[in-house]
Amino acid sequence: MAALSGKIIQNAFLAQHRPQARHSTRYPSDFCALDTRSVHSFQERRLRLAGTSAKWLNTISTAWISSSKQAYISCNAAQGSSVVSSSAKVDFLKLQNGSDIRGVAVGGVEGEPVNLTEPVTEAIASAFAAWLLNKKKADGWRRLRISVGHDSRISAHKLQDAVTLGITTAGHDVLQFGLASTPAMFNSTLTEDEINHLPVDGAIMITASHLPYNRNGLKFFTSAGGLNKADIKDILERASRIYEDSSHGSTQELEQASKGEVSNVDYMSIYASDLVKAVRKSAGNKEKPLEGLHIVVDAGNGAGGFFVDKVLKPLGAITTGSQFLEPDGMFPNHIPNPEDKTAMKAITQAVADNKADLGIIFDTDVDRSAAVDSSGRELNRNRLIALMSAIVLEEHPGTTIVTDSVTSDGLTTFIENKLGGKHHRFKRGYKNVIDEAIRLNTIGEESHLAMETSGHGALKENHWLDDGAYLMVKLLNKLAAARILNPNVGSKVLTDLVEGLEEASVTVEIRLKIDQNHADLKGGSFRDYGEAVLKHLENSISKDEHLCKAPKNYEGVRVSGYGGWFLLRLSLHDPVLPLNIEAPSKDDAIKLGLAVLTAVSEFPALDITALNKFLQQ
Ligand SMILES: O=P(O)(O)OC[C@H]1O[C@H](O)[C@H](O)[C@@H](O)[C@@H]1O
């Protein structure tokens, strides 16, 4: 292993810039105009590349980004990364966000310095290749094929170039997919297609999901699924060593550098055609099973626009009124997030304006989704889980549905009493939920669906891939099958499936921040502090006769009372204690909130302003 990663490290700083020369015509030739004969350290060479990228980004900005304000920010973006000094110390581990990598890729936002620079990204990509090679060491040294895709962010192209460089200089080949969805990237590790050199050994998606325009990140996949936290830590540690060691390159090493090839593949067409096939199959192989059905899509200017041209239209659906399909990394219309109220309002409005039968909304990288029925009823959060549970339980009676921790009591009753399934309410985090469903199957408890209220959902039949487009395809399958029997049915088929789901009239999430610099932490971590808050809350609850701790709970403190419930837990990533409350009335919600307030106000490092505000409303 040491020798293997040594080889990668060596190759990584033997960077030459040939891959750019092979890029598609999208790249202006001056982008590759680097003097590869002169010898520079790994970081210096990458800084020169960053400068060149700035020029390139300016050149393409009018095509890539529509408004002048956006073009200005894109220039800023490149400048932000090019000012990083080659001697700057980089804390790679700070870029870890659970099982993803996230950072600031665009400068200009106060207090948010760029930390996901091109040299850093390049080192991470080299490290992923080294990690992947190590995983496949049974095969011996060989050239890997890695697919690279990105969402619509304004830093997408410069990071794509950095990733490509990191992989090719390590001697491996890159398949560039361009604008792609996260699930499609995973899928490319499974697709059998010799002509397009598929499947790939690994895939990298450049995305920061719904986060603001200045962020970006990386997600990694192998055919076994998304990498876990430990893998990401391993990759970041390798990347740090690659970055640090880079100043030791020599002329001779540069001469010997092995370089991978770069090719462009229209993978989204391949991936989308599988979705089309799935819907046709559920409608007895009818060519246009959605003919006459009006479906509007809101891609939020992310990567989901393909769903209209490559999925819905071939299936015969009418898609007029679909909106925000064109990629725009400034997200000028709304945050591409099916949990966001403004985003849901936008798609609901589009359904109403167009008198559509169904609305579909995706997040930026299409691993999450939600729907709206023809009456404007939102099918997201608990309702979407209920709907998917109804579909999956028809196919697999009695199966266990694994969800995140903030799902409602009403959902449990619905799954268990109405649908005859089992609800396993686990932890927050899509990876946690998916891994738990996989674990249940390995210990003999059948589970076919893992879903979060955030709109992440994965099915066993789809390789446990959390794919927002596939979730919507499951809804389309249902519609297509129903229309075989009655060509006039619309989204009522779906709405009827969630009939009987009890919903609280008050649903709120309040996020309580922990001040990490507060003296009350006594030098300890925010996690320790948060745990202490939770312990204290648990004790105080046990003395309150109106409240009852949930008998089974996997994170935080979940309590029933006053006809509703609350959950206080530690955020997966941030120094925050999110508090979810659901209650039949505002009065009941306030009673639950007050029970929390009484316990947590003894912790001065906890900012309870948001809770007080809710209680005083
Ligand atoms: O714990 P929180 O701060 O609420 O964040 C929880 C969320 O974190 C990430 O965004 C994960 O991708 C989600 O799957 C998860 O739901």
Image (cartoon, helix red, strand yellow):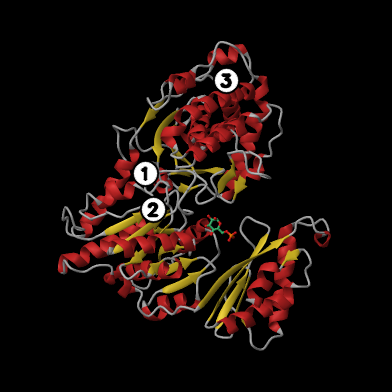
Residue 613 percent coordinates (x, y): 66, 72
Between 26 and 99, the one lying in front of the other is 26
Front: mark 1 or 3: 3
Is residue 420 left or right of 7 when viewed as pictured? left
* Figure quadrant of the C terminus: bottom right
Q: Amino acid at mark 3?
A: Leu
Q: Nearer the viewer, residue 218 or 32?
A: 32
Q: Which residue is mark 2?
A: 463
Disc 1, disc 2: CB below 8 Å? yes
Cα distance, mark 1 to mark 3? 31 Å
Which residue is more in the foreground, 256 or 523? 523
Residue labelled 2 has its Cβ within 8 Å of some atom of ligand 1: no
Residues under labels 1 and 2: Cα distance? 9 Å
Pointer 3 residue Cβ closer than 8 Å to ligand 1: no
Q: Secondary structure at mark 3?
A: loop
Residue 542 lies, with reference to residue 431, above or below; the image says: below
State which tag comes first along the sequence, 1 or 3. Answer: 3
**Callout 3–callout 2 Cβ contact below 8 Å:** no
Read off the residue under disc 1: 190
Residue at the spot 45% in from the left edge and 70% down from the top edge: 382
Q: Quadrant of ligand 1?
A: bottom right
Q: Residues within 10 Å of mark 2 (few under 14, many from 20)?
A: some
Mark 3, residue position:
14
What residue is drawn where x is 51% and y is 56%? Answer: 431
Q: Is residue 78 visible?
A: yes
Residue drawn at (61%, 25%), measured in percent from left and top?
47
- Tell me if mark 1 has few (under 14), some (14-19) or many (20+) residues whose alpha carbon lies within 10 angstroms of its own: some
Please tell me the numbered disc located at residue 13.
none
- Looking at the image, residue 508 sits to the left or right of residue 570; the answer is left
Horizontal and vertical percent position of residue 241: 66, 32
